[in-house]
Image (cartoon, helix red, strand yellow):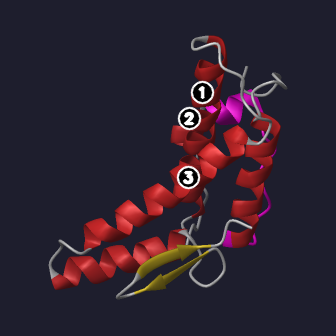
Amino acid sequence: MWLDCENNGQTQAWEMTRKIWQKCTPRPWPLLLIGLIRGAPTVAYENDFNKDTERLRTLISMTIWSIWKSRNKSTILNQDIAPNETRETLKDLIQDLIRKSWNATCFMEEGSRKIHQHKLQKIWADKKFARFNMKMGPTIDLS
């Protein structure tokens, strides 16, 4: 279901995931097989200074969730889904995650806030994929 079904918009969602990955890191997008999807929580890159491990785990999880939501809408609710709907759901999920993660730092003590903000900037490639403004929060480039 995660790699074979063409009716749930997953091709466009995985393509968007790959584009996000390429904006965030020079590391090549890994070969996407069912084993990688199933084992995503255990994936770890050596010398991961750019937070590629965490980003990959997050992107795989969010993509699977968007595919699952579209599948349920189609099969359980018997509603038609547009070919790009899964991709748009993925975009919304990623934006929401980054925005909420950033907003959560506002409630932290100064030292912890700076550490967590820096971590978010590392994960989401500040000025390449997401721009982080200390006052306005994140702006995400999903083009």
Q: Quadrant of the C terminus?
A: bottom right
Majority secondary structure of magenta residues: loop
Picture disc at residue 92 = 3
- Amino acid under label 2? Trp
Residue 37 among magenta residues: yes
Q: Residues within 10 Å of mark 2 (few under 14, many from 20)?
A: some
Q: Are marks 1 and 2 in contact (CB under 8 Å)?
A: yes
User: Which picture quadrant has residue 48?
Assistant: bottom right
Query: Mark 1, residues whose alpha carbon is within 10 Å: few (<14), some, or many (≥20)?
Result: some
As measured in the structure, the alpha-carbon distance from the residue carrying label 3 to the one carrying label 2 is 12 Å
Q: Which mark is residue 68?
A: 1
Which numbered disc, 1 or 3, marks the residue closer to the eye? 3
Q: Quadrant of residue 85?
A: top right
**Residue 44 shows in this picture:** no
Q: Nearer the viewer, residue 97 or 60?
A: 97
Give the residues drawn in magenta, as a range.
24-38
Q: List the residue tagged with mark 2.
A: 65
Residue located at (52% from left, 60% from top) = 95
In three-dimensional space, the C-alpha distance between marks 1 and 2, rounded to whole angstroms, equals 5 Å
